[in-house]
Image (cartoon, rainbow, N blue to C red):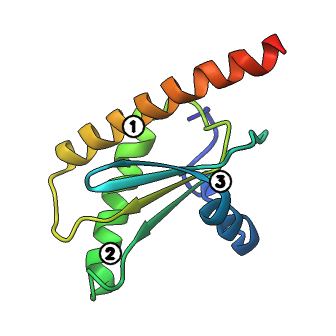
Amino acid sequence: MNPGQNGRSLSLKSPILISALFSKGQRHFQYPLILIRATEPTTAGKVVFSVSKKKFKRAVDRNRIKRQLRAVFFSLQKNTPETHLALVYVGAEFLPTLKLAEALQRLLVETTANNGPQKANKKAI
């Protein structure tokens, strides 16, 4: 995260962008998370966090998981993302923050590994 930017300035709030992200984005799964990444890069990438209302009926439970996800994501993400991201929690139980951090770390490594060759191919053409 860049100095002077907080989590609020990096959160994705536009319903149009969120629906486009969920319909056209690339999905990567690592239990208990699904990371959805926009296919086209943007200048100011933003993030949205989602927890199922069907699995966690109480808002305090959903908010707790979202707080954990935000803390883990912003601690692992040094700079702002170059694309819009959605992190969806699909687990049915609470997990410790360390397990979430491990899963998110694997997802970020997977997406950067998949993203690298694609960018190289586009520049080579």
User: x and y percent of residue 23 in the render?
Assistant: 64, 65
User: x and y percent of residue 94 in the render?
Assistant: 16, 65
Tell me the element at label 3: helix
Cα separation, mark 1 vs mark 3, equals 16 Å
113 over 108 or under it: above or below: above
Q: Are marks 1 and 2 in contact (CB under 8 Å)?
A: no
- Most extreme residue toward the right is 125
Q: State the residue position of label 3.
A: 9
The answer to whether 15 appears left or right of 115 in the picture is right
Viewer-nearest residue: 123 or 95 = 123
Tell me the element at label 1: helix
Q: Amino acid at mark 1?
A: Ser
User: x and y percent of residue 69 in the render?
Assistant: 36, 54
Sequence-wise first label, 2 or 3: 3
Sequence-wise first label, 1 or 3: 3
User: x and y percent of residue 107 in the render?
Assistant: 39, 38
Quadrant of the image containing the N terminus = top right
